[in-house]
Image (spheres, rainbow, N blue to C red):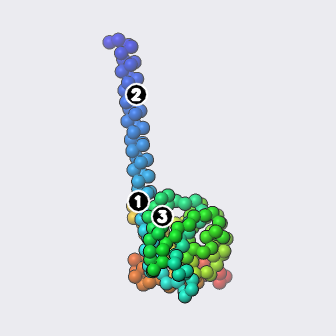
Amino acid sequence: MNLRYTINGCLALAVVLLTMNLSLTALAQDEEAQVVNREYHLKAAFLFHFTSFIGWPDGALGDEFIEVGVLGQDPFGDALDTIDGKVVQGRTIVVKRSRSTEELSSCAVLFIARSEQAQLQEIVSKVGHRPVLTVSEIKGFAHQWGVINFETVGNRVRFEINNEAAKRSRLQISSRLLKVSTIVDDLHQATARR
């Protein structure tokens, strides 16, 4: 057997295996991106539907719009564009994105991105007891500060609700929404009493 053909054959095999490996890696990454994309489209749909099951105090919402804000590094990509302009409770959804709570101060729904975890307590204190539905996917968010927390278990998106936090924000959550969620203890109130 000629050594040159053996080396060329090995090189060709190595190139084929490398190409297959890169293709499989790209395929796996593409599949993972599709799963994440689906996850955030589902979370966007949940944000839209949450507005149907929340009662805000009189005068808390404008006559025309319900503003949904994303604070921090937006994980949704174009998923929130699917709800922008839809109508709920006779008002049009308007999606806003910012890294500043001041720029989102008119929002009735505030999604706090993971990028804001270090400033979470400060953010929630700025929102205060205003009638704002706070939502996040930061671990433990609903226990400590917020009203609704998304959690992904396997390939399913679920959500936790802190009804006491909702009451502090003067929001009323429909019993229908409470039935399909996990109700969590309000640890924020427990630490405030100490």
Amino acid type of the residue that numbered disc 2 sits on in the rendered structure? Ala
* Crowdedness near tag 1: few (<14), some (14–19) or many (≥20) residues, C-alpha within 10 Å: some
How far, Cα to Cα, is label 3 from label 2? 44 Å
Looking at the image, tell me whether mark 3 or mark 2 is earlier in sequence order: 2
Q: Position of residue 15 (x, y in %)?
A: 40, 28
Left or right side of 144 for 18: left
Residue 64 visible, this orientation: yes
* Crowdedness near tag 3: few (<14), some (14–19) or many (≥20) residues, C-alpha within 10 Å: many
Residue at the location (61% across, 64% down)?
A: 98
Closer to the camera in the image, 124 or 151: 124
Residue 135, label in figure: none
Amino acid type of the residue that numbered disc 3 sits on in the rendered structure? Leu
The picture quadrant where one finds residue 70 is bottom right
How far, Cα to Cα, is label 1 from label 3? 12 Å
Q: Secondary structure at mark 3?
A: helix
Amino acid type of the residue that numbered disc 1 sits on in the rendered structure? Arg
Mark toward the viewer: 3 or 2: 3
Looking at the image, tell me whether mark 1 or mark 2 is earlier in sequence order: 2
**Pointer 1 residue:** 38
**Pointer 3 residue:** 80
**Pointer 2 residue:** 14
Q: Please say if the residues under marks 1 and 3 sit with CB atoms less than 8 Å apart.
A: no
